[in-house]
Amino acid sequence: MRNICAVWLCAAVSTVVSGSLFAATVKDIFQAESENQFLLTVEAALARTQAQQGIIPQWAADEISKKAFTRYAPLEEIRAEQSRVNHRMVALLNVWAKSMEDGAGEYVHFGTTTVDIFDTVLVLQLRQAALMLISDMRDIELSMIDLAKKHRNTVMIGRTLGQHALPITFGKKVSVWLGENRRNIERLKEVLARLDQSGILKGAVGSYLGLGDKAMATEAGFVAELGLKAPFLDDWHASRDVLAEYGLVLALISKSYGHIGHELFVLQMTDIGETEEMLKSTAVGSSTMPHKKNPKKPEALIFASRTIPRLAEVIMDDMISFFERDDTSRTANTLADISVATEAMLAQAKSLISQIKVKPEVMRANIDRTRGLIMAQRVTFALAEDIGKTTANSLMHDVSKYAIDNDLTLREAIEKEPRVTKYLSSSDLDQLFDPLTYVGLAAQQVDQVIGQIMLQRSTDPSDH
């Protein structure tokens, strides 16, 4: 599903063999060659906008746009030049200008400041990364939907505080994951909307100095050329809140998948065994204990949920900067790291959830481990119709204690208690002790969650 390509991006893809803006993975987006292509694309958009306003000659903008591809600014030459001038942007501009005819290089980077260009590039990178991550989460969502539908009626024990509580269905459990995943997609969409407004061209101290009287119009045209929306009016360089929000949302996403990973880790424990991660037949669980089938991907999700939030803390701390500008460009590396780490986490989650083995027979057997005690609530409600809820609750508390103290099933204890059998026949008890018929509206919950999500999917950004 990863075919994310804006109009200006697709044009580059169709023209450039190497160094285009197309990226197959999030990691590709942040590679040096890709970043240089973003820089050239942004500089060309500025030149075209300034030419439309008569700030620079049209012929110069045409030449700049014609040469706005990394084959005209080879990476190795830029690196060599950077070692000489010790400035990334100056190195790129010096190398790139050599390819331009008739002095068009004189009009590159005209009136702007490097921080505007790099921050706009970062916005474009994060925007493309966010689209890819949303696409990955949508794929996982489909796997969850399939899993929830398949196990809509698969009964298992619901646990609270680590103890057996009441029956649910595995589909209901997955619907919880579904809802959380969808809320995270919606959160990332909200961040994406703010990234769309974060293209910036406000000058060295954010007051448009150096860009001339048409600076605000230039900024508006510049971001439009890049497929972005009207920019924020304030100078956000020293705020960094949108970048921090991006990091925090990825941290939240990691916690959600850490939650899923932890649950599947525990459900796969030998003592529970209700699910199983599918591994290659050649996979080895332990070098010395061949019987072990250790969870791999659940553990990876748990670890990601610990590391990704730490990266988000660094990005959030970057909001504390000095005056109008700070050397905040270093955080771009952390934003790249957290994006790539999230992509890797989602790949693990997708593989795990799409292939997880569910064991209904083990789930059913585990329900019986409390020997019917989990059905005490249901029997209480049935008795309440005749003797009242408070009296029924007190009576069933005594019966349950009697069952535990005398190593009996709850039904065996009930059958010894005439105050219960007076109102409930053997056939009544057959029905009351069937956990398959005591899952509440779990199946309907699955249906409703899936229905709502299918509607929300129609509002997601296109991945074409």
Image (cartoon, rainbow, N blue to C red):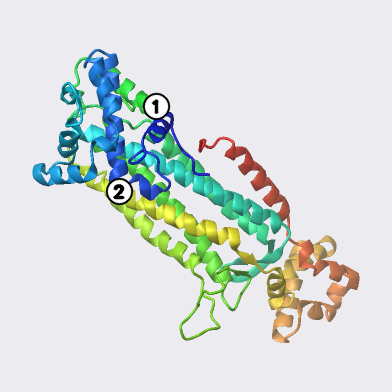
Residue 394 vs residue 328, the one in the foreground: 328
Residue 21 vs residue 323, the one in the foreground: 21
Which residue is under mark 1?
Answer: 229
Question: In the rendering, which numbered label is found on residue 315?
Answer: 2
Looking at the rendered structure, the number of numbered marks drawn on it comes to 2
Quarter of the figure with residue 385: bottom right
Give the residue at x 45% y 44%. 132
Q: Is residue 276 left or right of residue 233?
A: right
Q: Is residue 119 visible?
A: no
Q: Could you tell which of marks 1 and 2 lies nearer the N-terminus?
A: 1
Task: Name the kind of residue labelled 2 in the image.
Answer: Ile
Give SS at disc 2: helix
Furthest-top residue in view?
A: 54
> Residue 5's spot in the image, x, y percent?
45, 35
Residue 464 vs residue 58, the one in the foreground: 58
Q: Is residue 368 left or right of residue 463?
A: right
> Residue 297's spot in the image, x, y percent?
49, 65
Q: Residues within 10 Å of mark 1 (few under 14, many from 20)?
A: some
Q: Residues within 10 Å of mark 2 (few under 14, many from 20)?
A: many
Residue 322 to residue 385: above or below: above
Residue 315 to residue 418: above or below: above
Give the Cα separation between the discs numbered 1 and 2. Answer: 24 Å
Task: Name the kind of residue labelled 1 in the image.
Answer: Lys
Residue 213 vs residue 284, the one in the foreground: 284
> Residue 242's spot in the image, x, y percent?
35, 39
